Image (cartoon, grey):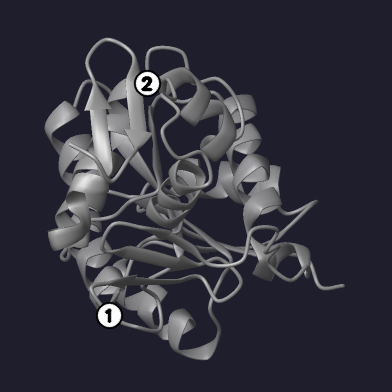
Amino acid sequence: MPRPRIYIVEDDDDIREMLLYVLSDDYDAQGFASAPEFDRALNLALPELLLLDIMLPGESGLQVLSRLRSDRRTANLYVILLTAKGSEYDRVKGLNLGADDYVAKPFSVLELTARIKAALRRLPQATGKQPENPDGELCLGAVTVFPDRRRVMVEGEPVTLTFKEFELLTYLLRHPGLVISRDRLMREIWGFDFEGESRTVDMHIRTLRKKLGAGADVIQTVRGAGYRADADQ
């Protein structure tokens, strides 16, 4: 089986080369210093996962992310943002644009590789496994999810979600009426504990509700406890 392909878009030569060195043993890792270089590679082959720096020359990482999410070919590409430490605005904006995860610089290589492994374990295109469908289609209120096809419908109209948004929605719908804490969602959807990162869950829930439109009310906030999927208000 081919090794999972990872693209790294990072203009800092030292960081890019370090990531290539760390990842190349286990993955088909390729690095790019700018958006145009990345675009040329993307036209040839899609990666399973993208590490995307926000601060790039010319077109910024956030602009690249916005383009990726608006293109049907790359709408579901798993994206981990590399952000400046303390730049909460960029992180929040990135999550709003559909980033699946973020890591703040300077970052721990062990933490980053752990997040990459956790992400790839959940991606069927990286594992070669077909998506599991233990429950068949999931319906709640105006929302219908087809797990085997990774398809979401709201009032009969298709809705495009990122990988993490789809995983969140499916997990909640598989546990209707159950209040699920942010910590549990982090473990189940992101793969392990992200201490102090509950805002990541909140931002993904916010963008998910926005995309669901008329079906947004199936995801309810339980103050101080977490979230639940329920058709009753």
- Tag 2, which secondary structure? loop
The answer to whether residue 104 is left or right of residue 175 is left
Which residue is more in the foreground, 197 or 174? 174
User: Total of numbered circles in the picture?
Assistant: 2
The residue carrying mark 1 is: 156
Q: Earlier in the sequence, mark 1 or mark 2?
A: 1
The answer to whether residue 66 is left or right of residue 176 is left
Q: Is residue 120 above or below residue 139?
A: above
- Considering every residue shown, the one lying at the far front of the view is 232
Instruction: Write the residue at 69% across / 42% down.
Output: 22
Residue type of the residue flagged with mark 2: Glu
The answer to whether residue 198 is left or right of residue 112 is left
The residue carrying mark 2 is: 197
The answer to whether residue 43 is left or right of residue 218 is right
Q: Quadrant of residue 35?
A: bottom left
Residue type of the residue flagged with mark 1: Gly
Q: Return the x and y of residue 141 as percentages of the image width and height.
A: 28, 57
Q: Return the x and y of residue 204 as percentages of the image width and height.
A: 29, 42
Q: Which mark is residue 12?
A: none
Q: Return the x and y of residue 223 as percentages of the image width and height.
A: 22, 15
Q: Quadrant of residue 230?
A: top left
Q: Quadrant of the N terminus?
A: bottom right
Q: Return the x and y of residue 34 as percentages of the image width and height.
A: 32, 65
Q: CA distance from mark 1 to mark 2?
A: 34 Å
Instruction: Write the residue at 70% across / 50% down.
Output: 121
Instruction: Write the residue at 80% across / 51% down.
Output: 25
